[in-house]
């Protein structure tokens, strides 16, 4: 029973971490800021920009990339597929085209967040 609870806790924690981009307040973010959000190098983000057609940040006159919230959400999908789920780049491209993975609604994520809170309270009570 504890083993199942630990797995659910880990699953809920992973879903919670996937929403790391939930509280974005600025209109534009630099590539350094975005790289820090995902704990990757800016060069990896530039590489993914070349590999994934749906990731196209705006560039200013100097050529600096400016990522919108929409761009960051696209990057979050790519990061989840490639880094967390172990997809190849071709597999991630195919998955994003078919959009199977991301048919979850915000309602489902909210339910998992509430479940996480309940599990955290239970964990504290059990000591």
Image (cartoon, rainbow, N blue to C red):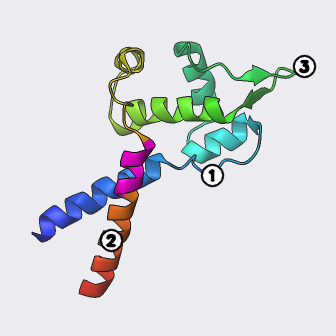
Q: Position of residue 28 (x, y in %)?
A: 77, 36
In the displayed orientation, state which residue is furthest to the left. 1
Q: Which of 85 and 106 is in front in this view?
A: 106
- Residue in the image at 63% along x and 52% along y: 23
Q: How crowded is mark 1: few (under 14 residues within 10 Å), some or many (20 or more)?
A: few
Q: Which mark is residue 23?
A: 1
Q: In which quarter of the image is residue 115?
A: bottom left
- Give the residue number, with chain letter if any, for mark 2: 118
Q: State which tag comes first along the sequence, 1 or 3.
A: 1
User: Which quadrant: the N terminus?
Assistant: bottom left
Q: Quadrant of residue 95?
A: top left
SS state under label 3? loop
Q: Which of marks 1 and 3 is in front?
A: 1
- Residue in the image at 53% along x and 50% along y: 20
SS state under label 1? loop
- Give the residue number, with chain letter if any, for mark 3: 61
Q: Position of residue 2 (x, y in %)?
A: 14, 71
Q: Position of residue 50 (x, y in %)?
A: 59, 14
Does residue 127 appear in the picture of this structure? Answer: no
Q: In this view, does 26 lie to the left or right of 102?
A: right
Q: State which tag comes first along the sequence, 2 or 1.
A: 1
Q: How crowded is mark 2: few (under 14 residues within 10 Å), some or many (20 or more)?
A: few
Q: Position of residue 101 (x, y in %)?
A: 34, 29
Q: Is residue 27 above or below residue 82?
A: below
User: Which quadrant: the C terminus?
Assistant: bottom left
Q: In which quarter of the image is residue 4?
A: bottom left
SS state under label 2? helix
Q: In this view, does 125 lie to the left or right of 31?
A: left
Q: Is residue 116 above or below residue 108?
A: below
Q: In this view, does 3 lie above or below 14?
A: below
Magenta residues span 106-112
Q: How far apart are marks 1 and 3 (CA)?
A: 28 Å
């Amino acid at each position: 029973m504890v083993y199942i609870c630990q797995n659910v806790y880990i699953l809920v924690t992973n879903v919670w971490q996937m929403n790391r981009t939930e509280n974005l307040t600025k209109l534009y973010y630099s590539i350094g800021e975005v790289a820090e959000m995902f704990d990757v190098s800016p060069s990896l983000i530039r590489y993914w920009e070349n590999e994934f057609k749906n990731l196209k940040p705006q560039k200013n006159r100097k050529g600096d990339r400016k990522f919108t919230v929409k761009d960051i959400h696209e990057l979050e999908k790519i990061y989840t597929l490639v880094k967390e789920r172990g997809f190849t780049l071709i597999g991630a491209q195919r998955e994003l085209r078919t959009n199977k993975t991301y048919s979850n609604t915000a309602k489902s994520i909210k339910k998992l967040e509430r479940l996480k809170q309940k599990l955290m309270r239970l964990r504290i009570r059990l000591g």
